[in-house]
Amino acid sequence: MNRCRAHGGGGGGRGPAGEIRRRDRPGASRSSYDLVCLFDCLHDMGDPVGAARRIRQAWAPDGTLLLVEPLAGDGLEDNLTPVGRTFYGLSTVICAPASLA
């Protein structure tokens, strides 16, 4: 956290543009986060809808969700490419076990 504060944005040496808070810190509200980031993980969760609901509760009223998920086709025939084959292979050993854990 301190490292983030020290290297935060804002420009002109003014420090971070926003405040970095931990939810377990005294005084942190239930809707503390201005930005929530999910990178290649929502589809791996056992209950992605429940996780999304909980994340929404943690946002500030005008908060933002940055969600990045792999671009994959809906059908097998759409994914018969080198990248698609890699996604299927990795999904078998990483994504499926993680969602079942």
Image: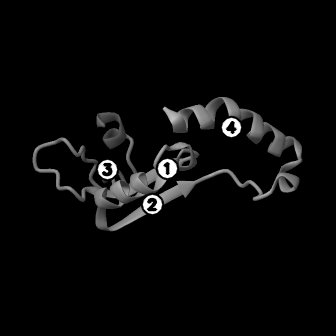
* Precedes in sequence: disc 4 or disc 3: 3
The one nearer the camera, 83 or 95, is 95
Residue that extends furthest to the bottom in the rendered view of this protein: 62
Q: Is residue 63 above or below residue 44?
A: below
The local secondary structure at tag 3 comes to loop
Residue that label 4 marks: 91
The one nearer the camera, 25 or 95, is 95
The local secondary structure at tag 1 comes to strand
The answer to whether the residues at label 2 and label 1 have Cβ atoms under 8 Å apart is yes
Tell whether 44 sits left or right of 86: left
Q: Quadrant of residue 58?
A: bottom left
The one nearer the camera, 78 or 21, is 78
* Precedes in sequence: disc 1 or disc 3: 3
Residue that label 1 marks: 38
* Precedes in sequence: disc 2 or disc 3: 3
Residue that label 3 marks: 15
- Between disc 4 and disc 3, the foreground one is 4
Residue that label 2 marks: 65
Residue that extends furthest to the left in the rendered view of this protein: 26
Amino acid type, callout 3: Gly
* Precedes in sequence: disc 1 or disc 4: 1
* Precedes in sequence: disc 2 or disc 1: 1
- Between disc 2 and disc 4, the foreground one is 4
Q: Residue at x 31, y 50 (%)?
A: 15
- Between disc 1 and disc 4, the foreground one is 4
Q: Mark 4 to mark 3: distance in Å?
A: 40 Å
Q: Residue at x 28, y 63 (%)?
A: 60
**Residue 73 seen in the current view:** yes
